[in-house]
Amino acid sequence: MQNSFTEENYLKIIHALSGREGLEVSTNALAESTSTRAASVTDMLRKLAEKGLIHYKKYQGVRLTESGEKVAINVIRKHRLWEVFLVEKLGFGWDEVHDIAEELEHIASDHLVERLDSFLGHPRFDPHGDPIPDAKGNLTEPDYLILTDVAIGEKVRMMGVLDHAPSFLQHLDRAGITLGCILEIKEINEYDKSASVQIGDKQTLFISLEVSKNLLVQRR
Amino acid sequence: MQNSFTEENYLKIIHALSGREGLEVSTNALAESTSTRAASVTDMLRKLAEKGLIHYKKYQGVRLTESGEKVAINVIRKHRLWEVFLVEKLGFGWDEVHDIAEELEHIASDHLVERLDSFLGHPRFDPHGDPIPDAKGNLTEPDYLILTDVAIGEKVRMMGVLDHAPSFLQHLDRAGITLGCILEIKEINEYDKSASVQIGDKQTLFISLEVSKNLLVQRR
DNA sequence: AAAAAAATTTAGATTAACCTAAAAATTGAT
DNA sequence: ATCAATTTTTAGGTTAATCTAAATTTTTTT
């Protein structure tokens, strides 16, 4: 039988919360992420466990099984491909596509996903720099640095974001920080821990610690 | 509040069954079209009536209100635009797109629909020849002829189909009958009421009455 | 290691969308 | 115009996904 929209969302969120190490995810963390109550999560976990999609023992937290992982990664693949479509083909901003992709990611047809992937030219990354799993379900997270870990004087390339909130992405737009642009840390300001950063070959701006913590970059 | 997936489907089906004249639709007809039982339909009709989407009096059948009509036409607009996308951009056959579009038609964003419409170049018709309502909700059904109403010797242009079943569409593919092609009725065969029809400037084939009844054409 | 705090599960309800069976209303045939 | 057939509605249930409140288990603190 098919997985429901709701089941797919739980699997996707368990995947996100368990990280690359596949750590156990707690009931409360899931309740928070799904905007439901812990009791509702427990119900759903029993159901997902019965379907063989998660490993679950009472009070012990939860991990995806191989089959659950497969489902989760397929949902992520669809989400990210649709985001590329919305930005590259329909001209949406990177701050506008998340909610729409949350709906599109549950469209079922495999045939559709593969044709969409070809149409988009087999993109490797979505508009936020997140990697797109391939058709076989391989998802390799590139190991980017967080901007706070970059030393003064270093030049790095902007590769992605940790926070996907529209307000954060719009803030980056206003600062002229886009995927692929070069950032050079000029100094760290003692007063508020903000960084003075030169963006491309344009002006140098103060970047708050809050923002730096959410920027993924790569040395070059 | 928002209309559910299910509510949208009821409205779409009521629209289809009530025809251009906006005739009353019966509970049984809806049960048939939604693959549910009459009792379930009654429940849903009460709900839709409470939301002001349909005119409903017990035992009297049902009609869309203006607001229900608006919702129905928007769903139809989305369905048909997505079908154009699937055929024109992703390379699906016209026989493959219906079920996928049944899912895509419920994606909510108005912004998305308008951008999709632009991206596709504001198409007027979907891949089956059905007209696409405009952004304001205007839907004008062209008055095509059915092939059975065409006289011997006449040349007509193929403009659409009444049956959208994949098997029917595949049959047309095998016969070389595509949207826009020219058909000339050579004769009506007494034995089985089939028509001998020349397709474009290619060969003449027997077209069964069953098929002719489902072909929409236009004199030229 | 016992008590307090926090997290999780169980118990019992609710809502949307469906169901079957029975009752009521409408339609149609004589 | 009445009675039978058909259609529709009502009554009472079910399932998926949620909820609150209470009970239980685990974790943390002292």
Image: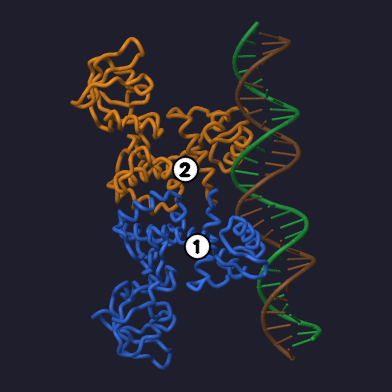
Chain colours: A orange, B blue, C brown, D green
Please state if B3 lies on the left or on the right of A166 as rendered. Answer: right
Can you say whether A63 is above or below B115 in the image?
above
Question: What quarter of the picture does the C terminus of chain B occupy?
Answer: bottom left
**Between B206 and D9, which is closer to the camera in this rendering?**
D9
- Provide the residue designation for mark 2: A71
In percent of width and height, residue A152 lies at 26, 14
Q: Residue at x 26, y 30 (%)?
A: A176
Please state if B21 lies on the left or on the right of D20 as rendered. Answer: left
Q: Hey, which quadrant is residue B199 in on the image?
A: bottom left
Q: Residue at x 46, y 61 (%)?
A: B73
In percent of width and height, residue A135 lies at 36, 45
Going by the numbered disc 2, the residue's amino acid type is: Val
Q: Residue furthest bottom?
A: B190
Can you say whether B102 is above or below B216 in the image?
above
| Cα gap from disc 2 to disc 1, whole angstroms | 38 Å
Q: Residue at x 67, y 69 (%)?
A: B59
SS at circle 1: helix
Q: Hey, which quadrant is residue C22 in on the image?
A: bottom right
- Provide the residue designation for mark 1: B69
User: Which chain is disc 2 placed on?
Assistant: A
SS at circle 2: helix
